[in-house]
């Protein structure tokens, strides 16, 4: 049996560093920089994105000291930026996105439409669209903390894909229901997507049909993404 060189040397392992490395893939910096980098609102900060304080409204140029001096994007650069925009909008990582793309390729129909519809069906996106949460990030947190049920079963996986007939409700606890009710009341002016039905009295949402290409929330040229991921 070969001895661990770190332990044999009497060194202590810093577990904090290990934890930080595991979480390095998740972006934890300023959200507004992402919107500015993509040049349009990705609605990553809820209410703030709809006010005059939105970074895109105040500074509609890429972040960085010498952003004005950057040259024209190459064909690859344009494709890459389109993919990054979709990833950041839905809050998925590169490996997750590649998995969605492989599944979309295997399905019948247009691969680009299949990819976007699959992302739109994510539970964190649905919870956000139903006004249960201010943003997709806060919706993800709501789900991970066990505050959301699908068909009366707790679901704490943000990437869960909803299907027709699914009923999404807050967990049957006073704290969860109050949290969702407060958010729904604050966002009551927001229009609910046509493929979803929100029942204010029962405080629940129902998937009435699967989304189609016209229901996709983000403006994207999916063909550029398909060209990039197919290489």
Image (spheres, rainbow, N blue to C red):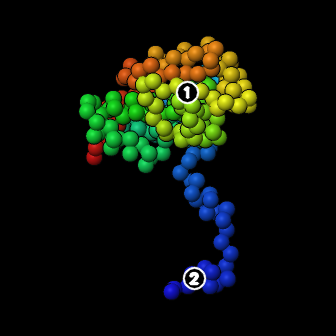
Residue 31 appears in the rendering: no
Under circle 1, the secondary element is strand
Going from N to C along the chain, the mark reached first, 2 or 1, is: 2
Seen at 68% across and 22% down, the residue is 181
Image spot of residue 184 (x, y percent) = 65, 20
Picture residue at 62% right of the left edge, 57% below the top: 20
Q: Which residue is mark 2?
A: 5
In the picture, measured across the screen, residue 59 lies left or right of residue 107, that is right
Disc 2 secondary structure class? helix
Counting other residues with Cα less than 10 Å from the Cα at mark 2, is it few (<14), some (14-19), or many (20 or more)? Answer: few
Q: Is residue 208 left or right of residue 141?
A: left
Q: Establish if 44 lies above or below 204.
A: below
Q: Is residue 182 positioned above or below 176 on the image?
A: above
Q: Is residue 204 above or below residue 158?
A: above
Q: Residue furthest front?
A: 152
In x, y percent, where is residue 48? 65, 25
- At x 65%, y 72%, the residue is 13
Image height check: is 26 above or below 194?
Answer: below
> Given this view, does label 2 or label 1 mark the residue nearer the observer?
1
Q: Is residue 88 left or right of residue 138?
A: left
Q: Nearer the viewer, residue 194 or 69?
A: 194
- Snapshot quadrant of residue 60: top right
Residue 86 or 178: which is nearer the viewer? Answer: 178
Residue 111 in sight in this render: yes
């Amino acid at each position: 049996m070969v001895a661990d060189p770190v332990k044999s040397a009497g060194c202590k392992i810093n577990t904090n560093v290990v934890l930080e490395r595991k979480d390095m893939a998740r972006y934890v910096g300023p959200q507004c920089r992402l919107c500015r980098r993509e040049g349009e609102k990705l609605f990553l900060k809820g209410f703030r994105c709809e006010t005059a304080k939105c970074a895109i409204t105040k500074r509609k140029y890429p972040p960085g000291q010498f952003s004005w001096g950057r040259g024209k994007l190459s064909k690859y650069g344009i494709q890459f930026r389109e993919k990054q925009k979709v990833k950041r909008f839905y809050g998925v990582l590169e490996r997750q996105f590649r998995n969605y793309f492989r599944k979309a390729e295997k399905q019948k129909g247009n691969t680009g439409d299949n990819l976007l519809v699959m992302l739109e069906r994510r539970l964190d996106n649905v919870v956000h669209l139903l006004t249960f949460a201010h943003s997709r990030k806060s919706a993800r947190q709501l789900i991970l903390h066990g505050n959301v049920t699908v068909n009366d079963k707790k679901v704490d996986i943000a990437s869960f894909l909803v299907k027709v007939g699914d009923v999404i409700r807050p967990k049957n606890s006073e704290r969860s229901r109050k949290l969702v009710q407060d958010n729904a009341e604050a966002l009551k002016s927001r229009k609910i997507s046509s493929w979803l039905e929100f029942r204010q009295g029962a405080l629940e949402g129902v998937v009435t049909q699967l989304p189609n290409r016209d229901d996709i929330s983000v403006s994207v040229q999916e063909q550029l993404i398909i060209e990039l991921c197919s290489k």
